[in-house]
Image (spheres, rainbow, N blue to C red):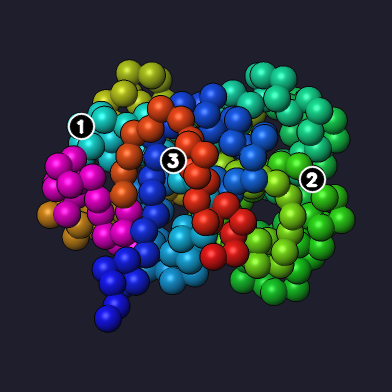
């Protein structure tokens, strides 16, 4: 008889300190995603995106809106840009080889972080829909054989590429999907003031700064949020949210335990 787990695979969304995340990325073998409202919508709509989340070893919360309005500020919010910034500010990458996949130059990436060897791959716009372009990126990653891969091509491209890298047997110890992290750090996009972020209104700040680019996405996210309002209002009490057949479990954790990376750590589950 099928179990509940068989019917609804589980993905744990963890509230973790930046130190714990940095340790997992640098010393462990992790595939790290950062969950926001857009990701929730994509989980409901895109089967391959759901599969990428099912195989991710660490998922953090990257939504002050979710944390403030529906989780009652119970979890640590760890954004991709903050994690990249913390890693770059420390010395944890200095003796590691790093590959950045995104719309940045080698000089720009080098101004953000220092590592033993730093390489950049700049795939064409919309590459995820072109099998030949995806294969070229996979070949570049395989040739570089980096210790850490930062994928900064936005959702769902970043997460889908991470899944395809793991399916292709890429042995890079760690992959971090970090969205627009390098754009924020390089000043190409402006981050909201701290007080705006704390109130969960960062989305409004970003929309005001770039309405043409973000209006459509945020309208879709808002429509999805309204359709999920019932389950979202129960999130603080239940700690769980089912989206597109994937059961999300939200947990605040002090650190990753010995089994903390789960079966998704190898991306082969």
Q: How far apart are marks 2 and 1 (CA)?
A: 39 Å
Magenta region, residue range: 231-248
Can you give x and y, in whole percent of width and height, for residue 49 in the image?
47, 64
* Residue ID at (46%, 26%): 17
- Is 125 colored magenta in this rendering? no
Which residue does the numbered mark 1 point to in the structure image? 72
Q: How far apart are marks 2 and 3 (CA)?
A: 23 Å
Can you give x and y, in whole percent of width and height, for residue 102 in the image?
68, 47
Tag of residue 189: none
Give SS at disc 2: loop
Q: Is residue 87 visible?
A: yes
Tag of residue 60: 3
Query: In the rendered image, which quarter contains the N terminus?
Result: bottom left
* Residue ID at (28%, 72%): 3
Give SS at disc 1: loop
Mark 1 neighbour density, 10 Å: few (under 14) some (14–19) many (20 or more): few
Mark 3 and mark 1 lie on one chain; the one further toward the N terminus is: 3
Can you give x and y, in whole percent of width and height, for residue 123 in the image?
73, 57
Tag of residue 146: 2
**Is residue 156 or residue 31 the one in the foreground?**
31
Q: Is residue 188 visible?
A: no
**Is residue 37 or residue 190 the one in the foreground?**
37
- Is 245 colored magenta in this rendering? yes
Q: Answer with the quarter of the image where residue 247 lies.
A: bottom left
């Amino acid at each position: 008889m099928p179990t509940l787990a068989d019917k609804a695979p589980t993905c744990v969304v963890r509230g973790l300190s930046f130190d714990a995340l940095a340790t997992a990325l640098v010393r462990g073998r992790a595939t790290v995603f950062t969950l926001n409202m857009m990701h929730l919508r994509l989980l409901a709509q895109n089967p391959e995106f759901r599969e990428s989340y099912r195989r991710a070893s660490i998922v953090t919360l990257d939504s002050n809106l979710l944390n403030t309005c529906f989780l009652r500020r119970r979890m640590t919010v760890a954004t991709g840009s903050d994690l990249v910034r913390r890693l770059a500010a420390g010395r944890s990458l200095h003796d590691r080889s790093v590959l950045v996949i995104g719309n940045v130059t080698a000089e720009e990436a080098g101004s953000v972080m220092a590592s033993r060897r730093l390489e950049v791959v700049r795939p064409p716009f919309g590459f995820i829909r072109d099998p030949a372009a995806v294969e070229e990126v996979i070949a570049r990653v395989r040739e570089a054989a980096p210790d850490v891969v930062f994928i900064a091509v936005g959702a769902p491209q970043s997460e889908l590429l991470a899944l395809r890298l793991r399916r292709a047997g890429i042995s890079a110890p760690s992959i971090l999907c970090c969205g627009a992290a390098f754009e924020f750090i390089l000043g190409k996009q402006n981050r909201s003031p701290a007080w705006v972020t704390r109130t969960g209104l960062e989305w409004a700040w970003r929309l005001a700064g770039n309405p043409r680019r973000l209006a459509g996405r945020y309208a879709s996210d808002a429509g999805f949020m309204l359709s999920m309002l019932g389950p979202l209002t129960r999130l603080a009490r239940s700690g769980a949210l089912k989206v597109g057949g994937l059961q999300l479990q939200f947990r605040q954790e002090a650190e990753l335990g010995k089994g903390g990376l789960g079966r998704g750590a190898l991306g082969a589950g």
